[in-house]
């Protein structure tokens, strides 16, 4: 039980990757605070965590709203008497359209949730972690932040900035014994990706052909990487970005 006696807050944990991360921490003994934009999805994950034996609460909050973020962190600290680990997973995609067809409102929404949300949650959690002189922050970015995917003019830059923000925070917060790292998933078998495949917006055969291991990753693969960064095993790792994509990014050629 690597996280017995520790408290973790996971944003965007109502489904998919975030839910897998929350349940992974629950299995390892952590007290789990589940955030989502909608109360019912947050409560669903929290209930699954309770069934695994964890102490869990559900919190509805918009991570792009500073007052809601501060209230969320304050509640976690109040109910669990502290906050040891923050996982910034909340994120949104964008309509897959060419630049000239993309609306500025779509850009603003993606940047607000993916980047501003990570910044605000990290800032709020860091206030407590600095006082405690300990903490772990894991940010979920994307392999898209390391490449130039066509028609991802908001999503990819938001994830590239998240990777850089993690490095900046790692340097600034390191003197307070706070580790900040990033996990960058590639194509993950979530409902979103499955829908893109069905719509023809993601060519599954092409993805698998380029992927050296010949398979897409699962939410549980991302959870494993996240739990590693949050564990004592990674005590001397900070400012790192771990790509979990079965080798997709490493392969510069379609074969």
Image (cartoon, grey):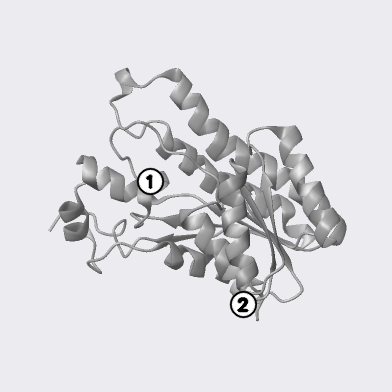
Q: Which mark is residue 233?
A: 2
Give the total number of marks visible in the rendering: 2
Where is residue 154 shown, x and y percent of the image? Answer: 42, 31
Taking depth in this image into account, of 235 and 81 the one nearest to the observer is 81
Q: Earlier in the sequence, mark 1 or mark 2?
A: 1
Residue 90 relative to residue 128: left or right = left
Tell me if residue 130 can be seen.
Answer: no
Q: Pointer 1: residues within 10 angstroms few (<14), some, or many (20+)?
A: many
Residue drawn at 17 percent across, 52 percent down: 206
Q: Pointer 2: residues within 10 angstroms few (<14), some, or many (20+)?
A: few
Q: Which mark is residue 105?
A: none
Tell me if residue 48 can be seen.
Answer: yes
- At mark 2, the secondary structure is helix
Would you name the residue on which mark 1 appears? Answer: 144
Pick the quarter of the image with the C terminus: bottom left
Residue 129 relative to residue 137: left or right = right
Q: CA distance from mark 1 to mark 2?
A: 27 Å
Where is residue 125 shown, x and y percent of the image? Answer: 75, 50
């Amino acid at each position: 039980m690597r996280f017995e006696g520790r408290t973790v807050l996971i944003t965007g944990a109502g489904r998919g990757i975030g839910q897998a991360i929350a349940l992974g921490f629950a299995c390892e003994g952590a007290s789990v605070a589940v955030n989502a934009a909608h109360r019912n999805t947050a409560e669903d994950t929290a209930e699954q965590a309770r069934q695994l034996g964890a102490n869990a609460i559900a919190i509805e909050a918009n991570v792009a709203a500073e007052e809601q973020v501060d209230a969320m962190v304050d509640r976690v600290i109040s109910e669990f008497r502290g906050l040891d680990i923050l996982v910034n997973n909340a994120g949104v995609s964008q309509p897959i359209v060419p630049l000239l067809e993309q609306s500025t409102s779509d850009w603003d929404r993606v940047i607000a949730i993916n980047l501003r949300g990570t910044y605000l949650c990290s800032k709020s959690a860091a206030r407590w972690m600095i006082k405690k002189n300990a903490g772990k922050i894991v940010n979920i970015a994307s392999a898209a932040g390391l490449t130039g995917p066509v028609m991802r003019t908001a999503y990819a830059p938001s994830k590239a900035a998240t990777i850089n923000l993690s490095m900046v925070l790692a340097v600034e917060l390191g003197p307070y014994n706070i580790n900040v790292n990033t996990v960058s998933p590639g194509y993950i078998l979530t409902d979103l990706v499955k829908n893109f495949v069905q719509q023809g917006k993601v060519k599954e055969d092409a993805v698998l052909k380029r992927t050296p291991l010949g398979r897409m990753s699962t939410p549980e693969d991302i959870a494993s990487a996240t739990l590693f960064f949050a564990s004592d095993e990674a005590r001397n790792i900070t400012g790192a970005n771990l790509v979990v994509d079965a080798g997709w990014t490493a392969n510069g050629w379609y074969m």
